[in-house]
Image: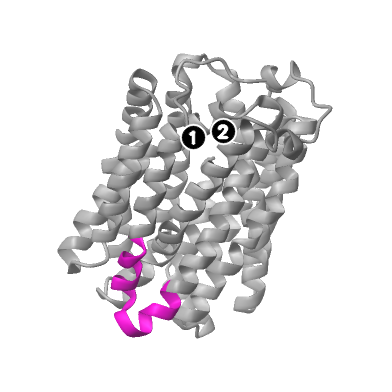
Amino acid sequence: MFLVSFDGSILVLGLPAIARDFNASVPDLANLGSGLQVGALLGLPLAMLADRLGRRRLLAAAVLGFSLANLASAAAPSLALLAGARVLAVGFESVAAAVATALVIEEVPHDQRARAVAAITIAGGAGLGLTTVLYPLFAPHWRWLYLFGCVGIPAAAALARFLPESRAWSATRTDQLPLSVLLTPPWRRRLLVAAAAAALSAVFFEPANILVALFASRQLHFSPALISAGVVVAGLVSLPAFPLGGWLSDRRGRRRVAVALSALTAVAAAVTFVDGTGGYWAGIVIWSFLASASVPVIGAWYGELFPTRARATSESVSTVAAAAGGVLGLQVVAAAQAHWGLGHSLAATGVVALVSAALLLALPETRGQPLPD
């Protein structure tokens, strides 16, 4: 999770420099972000293999895959080839995140699942933190960070050698295709709601996450160091949010906590883009805190909603749905920013994220229940 977050944040922080290197406009960058969502489609069959062949081997293969994609990213001579390398990276990163979450949920006691997801989320936050600290030291030379990401190659070998297999998965029969399992009651309805909520949320959060550094650079005229400073401050403030969200969810349940945090996160994120420098600083810190608190809640909840024999696949289906929503959101922002400006275009899509939060009410509470086989 550390490596997934480190890799995924390079493009966000380096986007202003990448735009300058390749002379790219906002629509070009929106198309780049849209193209990256194709990677989630590549991750789906790999996640299905994780439900058929086990967690350990697929997790190691996914880490190796996105680490090799980092090497290709560092050498990319054009925006198109960089996009191709990142598509592959996103596919492997989505699988790694899905399998890691499934493995943790399956290996910890039922009353500690959200806190366990919080622990690996903190590891992801540390990866983002390292990217944030390193980038100002090398800016505008973003390629160096992708070279550092190749450390995942020996890490993949270590995972393949030392990571134990999930006991819950080992005890479950895997004779059915994971997707066929998910398309039967009651999993079908749950999958539809989870996928729809993920897609609607991504209409706002995907362009917001990808373009936040570009917004700060072009609209607020922040330097790379100041942009990274904002990420560092938001990250430090958010550190207690991960265990707090996990603890609250393990004590009070998943459903109400997830809905409340999702709605408040959408409001805080929208404020980031509409109220100048003051709104940016307040919004990015509160947005980061609330989003960090919601990650272990939703991660544990989604893991408990689906059976072990299709858990990684269900995570990947939601990722694919989010990718589709992200493409739509990026294209809407790209079209609207010429008329409304980048900030207001981003904020306007926040309404869709509020609809996503409300849709989560259609899912059942799962806290304390045994994992379905």
Left/right of residue 78 with respect to residue 301 in the rendered view? right
In this figure, what is the number of numbered marks?
2
> Of label 1 and label 2, which has the lower sequence position?
2
Residue 242, how many percent across, how many down?
A: 36, 33
The residue at 60%/77% (across/down) is 79
Image color mode: one colour
- Give the position of the N terminus as an image quadrant: top right
Residue at the extreme left: 278
Image side of residue 201 versus residue 82, left or right = left
Residues rendered magenta in the picture: 333-350
Inter-mark Cα distance, 1 to 2: 7 Å
Relative to the observer, which residue lies in front, 251 or 260? 260
Q: Is residue 151 visible?
A: no
**Hey, what amino acid is under mark 2?**
Thr
Relative to the observer, which residue lies in front, 20 or 344? Answer: 344
- Asked whether residue 240 is in view, the answer is yes
Relative to residue 38, is residue 124 depicted above or below?
Answer: above
Tag 1: Cα neighbours inside 10 Å, few (<14), some, or many (≥20)?
A: many
Q: Is residue 351 left or right of residue 188?
A: left
| Foreground of the two, 154 or 252 | 252
- Which residue was labeled with disc 2? 101
- The image shows residue 293 at horizontal and vertical percentages of 34, 37
Give the position of the C terminus as an image quadrant: top right
Q: Are marks 1 and 2 in contact (CB under 8 Å)?
A: yes
Q: Is residue 185 left or right of residue 279?
A: right
Q: Which residue is mark 1?
A: 299
The image quadrant of residue 167 is: top right
Pick the residue in front: 156 or 257.
257
Say which amino acid is labelled 1: Gly
